[in-house]
Image: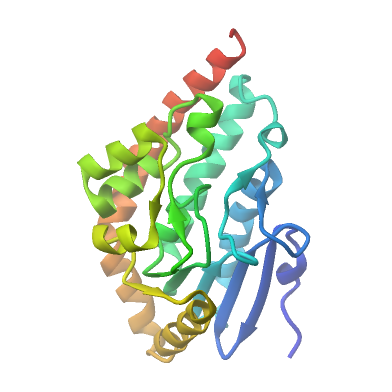
């Protein structure tokens, strides 16, 4: 059976499927992903296509090489000091997080290395495991000098509590996989060369569950997170946009 056309439609997303388990791998030309404005736009569309494909029974979300994501091409986002351009980013940002928590199938997040750009994508997974080489933090916002309002503030607070989330997002520091395990961010930390195989093992187990169970369990377990995303991300990104606009006057 041939793959759906959307598998090859997105330059920074490599997709393959076996026995109902869809792998979505962030990449740039086959190597670690450099996140761009195009990645942001494409991910909103890709998640919608994934959600509508009944042959996807479980998703494995990971990165390429030894990195989940730790680089971003700021200029590719366009003029973020322009309110009209920022509104496009704000709408896409909300859609990405909503669609991740609303996918009608479980997601296994596999942190195969540093996750200091959009770590919230992993934290929104239904099961999240990490390589011993994984690190977590927020690289772009302190670097650009804009507030972290695009979901990091909501998802990290929900997962680890307010005090730890505030420390992580204020300090700009990173935590290692062992600390992430202690904080409840991940359920397992594995040797680097074993983590992806373990992710597939979990995904195959979840994919084997009855379809209606998968769909409704997903809704049941993500109800609170979905509400937090809808409430917090539009406001947070509006504030982020204000600090972005200020960059144009610096």
Question: In which quadrant of the rendered view does residue 87 lie?
Answer: top right
- Colour pattern: rainbow
Residue visible at 33% across and 54% down in the picture: 226
Residue visible at 58% across and 9% down in the picture: 250
Q: Position of residue 79 (x, y in %)?
A: 68, 24
Question: In which quadrant of the rendered view does residue 186 lie?
Answer: bottom left
Q: Position of residue 80 (x, y in %)?
A: 62, 25
Give the answer, above or below, for where 111 lies relative to 139: below
Question: In which quadrant of the rendered view does residue 9 lie?
Answer: bottom right
Q: Quadrant of the N terminus?
A: bottom right
Q: Position of residue 243 (x, y in %)?
A: 48, 20
The answer to which of 70 and 224 lies nearer the viewer is: 70
Give the answer, above or below, for where 240 lies relative to 22: above
Residue visible at 25% across and 55% down in the picture: 224
Q: Is residue 206 left or right of residue 45?
A: left
Give the answer, above or below, for where 221 lies relative to 209: above
Residue visible at 67% across and 35% down in the picture: 77
Residue lying furthest top: 249
Q: Is residue 165 left or right of residue 138?
A: left
């Amino acid at each position: 059976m041939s793959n759906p056309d959307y598998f090859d439609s997105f330059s920074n997303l490599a997709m393959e499927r076996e026995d109902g388990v869809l792998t979505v791998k962030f990449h740039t030309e086959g190597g670690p992903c450099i996140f761009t404005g195009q990645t942001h736009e494409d991910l909103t569309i890709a998640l919608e296509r994934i959600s509508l494909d009944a042959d996807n029974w479980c998703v494995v979300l990971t990165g390429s090489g030894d990195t989940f994501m730790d680089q971003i091409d700021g200029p590719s986002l366009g003029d973020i000091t322009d309110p009209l351009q920022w509104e496009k980013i704000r709408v896409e940002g909300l859609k990405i997080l909503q669609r991740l928590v609303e996918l009608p199938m479980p997601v296994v997040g596999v942190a195969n290395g540093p996750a200091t750009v959009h770590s919230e994508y992993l934290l929104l997974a239904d099961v999240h495991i990490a390589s011993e080489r994984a690190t977590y933090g927020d690289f772009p916002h302190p670097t650009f000098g804009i507030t972290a309002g695009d979901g990091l503030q909501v998802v990290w607070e929900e997962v680890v509590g307010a005090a730890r989330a505030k420390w992580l997002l204020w300090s700009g520091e990173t935590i290692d996989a062992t600390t992430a395990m202690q904080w409840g961010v991940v359920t397992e930390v594995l040797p680097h060369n074993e983590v992806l195989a373990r992710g597939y093992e979990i995904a195959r187990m979840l994919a084997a569950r009855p379809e209606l169970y998968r769909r409704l369990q997903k809704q049941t377990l993500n109800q609170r997170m979905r509400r937090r995303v809808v409430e917090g991300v539009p406001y947070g990104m509006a504030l982020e946009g204000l600090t972005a606009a200020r960059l144009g006057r610096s």
